[in-house]
Image (tube, rainbow, N blue to C red):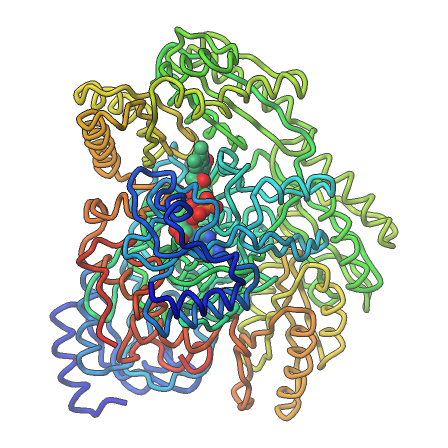
Amino acid sequence: MRPALLQQLKQIVGPEDVLTSDRDLMAYEYDATVEKFLPEAVVFASSTQEVAAVLRLTYQNKVPVVPRGAGTNLSGGTLPVKGGIVLELSRMTRVLTIDTANQRAVVEPGVINLDLQNLLAPLGFTYAPDPASQKVSTMGGNVGEDSGGPHCLKYGVTSNHIVGLEVVLPNGEVIHTGGAVEDSPGYDLTGLLVGSEGTLGVVTKITVRIIRLPETIKTLLGVYDRLEDVGQTVSDIIAAGIIPATLELLDRPVINAVEDSVQAGYPRDAAAVLLIEVDGVGDGLERQADLIVELCQKNKVREVRVAKSAAERDALWAGRRGAFGAVARVRPSYLVQDGTVPRTELAAILRKVLEISAAHNVTVGNVAHAGDGNLHPLFMYDPKDKDEARRVHEAGAEILKACVDVQGTLSGEHGIGLEKQKMMPWRFGPTEMDVMAKVKQVWDPADLLNPGKILPPEYQTAKAG
Amino acid sequence: MLSADAVGRLAGQLAGAAEVQVPDEQATAAWAVRGRRPSLICVPAAPEAVAAALALCDQTGAAVLPWGGGSQQRLGEPPSAYDVALVVRGLDQLVEFEPANLTATVQAGVRLADLQAALGAKGQWLPYDPPVSPAATIGGLLATNPSGPYRLKVGGLRDLLIGTVVATPFGSLAKAGGRVVKNVTGYDLNKLYVGSLGTLGVVVEATFKTSPRPETEGSWYAVFASAAQAGAAVGELLRTSLTPSGLEVLNDRVAAAADLPVPAGRWALLGRASGFRPAVDRHLAEFAKAARRAGAAGAEQLDESAAGRVWSAYAGFACQKRWQDDTLTCRFALPPDSVGRLADLAASHGGEAAVWAQASGAAFWTAALAPGEAGRAVAQLRAAARAAAGALVVENYPADVSDLNVWGPPGGPSELMRAVKREYDPRGILNPGRFVDGI
Ligand SMILES: Cc1cc2nc3c(=O)[nH]c(=O)nc-3n(C[C@H](O)[C@H](O)[C@H](O)COP(=O)(O)OP(=O)(O)OC[C@H]3O[C@@H](n4cnc5c(N)ncnc54)[C@H](O)[C@@H]3O)c2cc1C
């Protein structure tokens, strides 16, 4: 990067907030995926004005910019594949307003998801989307990926909770979309921006919907001997008119990894456990829980545990919360895949995951948001073993193909990023790809913002001008 | 407008793809929008035919108005041109309904009422209850995006829609989303189509999340001296952990139409809860408490048959009043805590004002006004809505009223919205001039 340009960046954000040494940059050459690309500089912005000034400059100089929150995305979303700068937003951490009467809060993009929840809890409110990475992931990143979480079955994903945005366009112009109210006139640009993976604009303020915390929560754990019975239980619960807050599945390999590390008390010989939570007003919740127990029993559950206290609830959750960490201890590393199938296909696809992985001779376990049909096969492997790494990626791709084959999709919540763009044609034809390329064309005609993401390379090239 | 020659040629071409009618003067009246009439009526029977027809219109430069049930065609500015009514009612198939998956895929010409009946046969429904005509189709609803009381509990149409197939002016059929409830595979184009008034493409198929029908429902109403008081009761309820499936504030005229005994000058708060019996009972008890705290004498529970009557009379009135000839209808989009105050303000404008509002922030005002007064009243109310961080859209207005900006300032930069429109409909053939800022 030209020294003059670096100098100008330093003038905007302050000299200490531009990193250029190799040692510093190396911390930004990866995210939670495995590939590596070195940025030319890392720039920390602390206000909308700074973001706008940086983007005006990069626009004039045709420098690519990759917005970044905590860098926990799992699809290569923050990798600077075409060089340029990484624009760090993790210092924009102000919660600007909390308006409980209108169920809204306005936050900056660097606010950590869990920090917002913790701030709202004493007021009796919460921000519902709860990615498992919520202790570290930022609201800007959640918006970028349209993140989900265990509670999305009942409460919906990030896009259902974002009503307005302040965004800096690639040329440095600051715009506002949506607002505090539902249905402002015009196109729903807010909805389009959520999940756009930092390719359309840099989000600098987020207006979110906040909701009342449920009055009562009931947590149950079903222990099963057959995956099919879990699938049928999920269908039966829903058919009975109950939409639980969560329906989380862990299969035997994950159960064993969990027991090796956090000892959640899950039976090691079970085919799977299903973590079920219902919430809402207290009246009648007991009856819902009883009904769920009946439905589990109808489907040959081995055992149902019902949490009788907050401590017991935490114990049941400990295994789910610790699942990724536990899996990480089995082998030097792990890779999490993300696909979605219609709920009714869940048991079959989980079986398929095991078959495909066996065929590729790789170790796998499954965590799934069962109620949403969203599966997360976890491959446990050694990245230094190039052949094993290759087999893991091949198995992952084959699983996603299997998802698409049953009317499922390539990603339920982690995004396309770099990792899955070559698979996009499995799901969408040239027509759809053209329609999506038009979106990019409208917002970022110069192709400077997080270039090289989402669309396959042949659809990425911006039109002249 | 196309020349007679061009119309003739286009009719010949379209006939290869769809049924085409060249209507006489009288027949066009049924397809008139704000005094404008089409030269051709095109009725495709399949999604591919819709795409083919659009491509032909695009090549000719013919202005197209997509037409579902025709029940909400008054929404928007008058079309700046109108050659072809593209009627999608022929797309009337329930494509797939998988109860265990809680999703349903339907063609755009299916009427909401028919979809609900099909889902109801399996104990489910689309949790969406806008007060609309029985003629309203899925395509038309996606384009106009009205909402009903249930929005308070489960969100709006944008939150229920998970997949679309859209016919484009380029002649293609483009999918977005899919049949799974969680999906981040590329840009979320579904959001762009909801409420876009058919200006970007013609939705031919849509997939929704469905829900189990609630085990039971309970309804109740209370009478207040003002909308602000009713709004205070709403505020109390929204601060609790309750999850009502409707909290509607009605002025005396609307309450009377809904068969609620509300004295002149007073307001009703009509509430509903849906779910399992004990939870519904709990809601009813808390409703009464909140109503008393906000100044009502008490709350009256409606028995099942009365509740059915009241809700359907209310929806019927709201729908009929909203789109009636010679009526000025405005929709406010408001933060919940200003709904009561703005409803009081609206009720004081114009004669025979009917005002009804939803706790999630939509409020409606209809009134009889002399043609000269409409513009001023709208300007005043819009200013009040905007001062409360909200917006106001004129949904319907009498034929003798002109010079209204029906949309007001859009919720985002117009240049970007226009750029979106240019990419998706470069020749501007879809509903030209009817949407925000001349789109
Ligand atoms: C252990 C673990 C568990 C996880 N669990 C879940 C889970 O349960 N559910 C789930 O959905 N995901 C999960 N993830 C993935 C990841 O945490 C989410 O995608 C998260 O939202 C990313 O947030 P971040 O702050 O790390 O964003 P980053 O990774 O920094 O960025 C994510 C994307 O958003 C863009 N972006 C970031 N900030 C902005 C901004 N201000 N403006 C515009 N674009 C921006 C980036 O360019 C990038 O494309 C998990 C990850 C890990 C490592």
In the image, residue B6 sits, relative to residue B59, either above or below, namely below
Q: Foreground: A303 or B283?
A: A303
In the rendered image, which quarter contains the N terminus of chain B?
bottom left
Q: Position of residue B374 (x, y in %)?
A: 63, 86
Q: Residue A285: where, in percent of width, then height?
A: 64, 26
Check the image and report above or below for A51 versus A366. below
Residue B346 higher or lower than B39, as above or below: above
Left or right of residue A279, residue B192 in this image: left
When asked about the image quadrant of residue B317, the answer is: bottom right
Name the quarter showing ligand 1.
top left
Decide which of B230, B341 is in the foreground and name it.
Answer: B341
The x and y percentages for residue A252 are 37, 14
The image quadrant where one finds the C terminus of chain B is bottom left
Total marks drawn? Answer: 0
Classify residue A143 as left or right of residue B193: right
Q: Residue at x 47, y 30 (%)?
A: A238
Give the quarter of the image for residue A26.
top left
Whether residue A326 is visible, yes or no, is yes
Residue ID at (26%, 24%): A353
Image spot of residue A377 (x, y percent): 33, 27
Q: Is residue A2 left or right of residue A146?
A: left
Depth check, front residue: A144 or A190: A144
Do we see residue A147 in this rendering? Answer: no
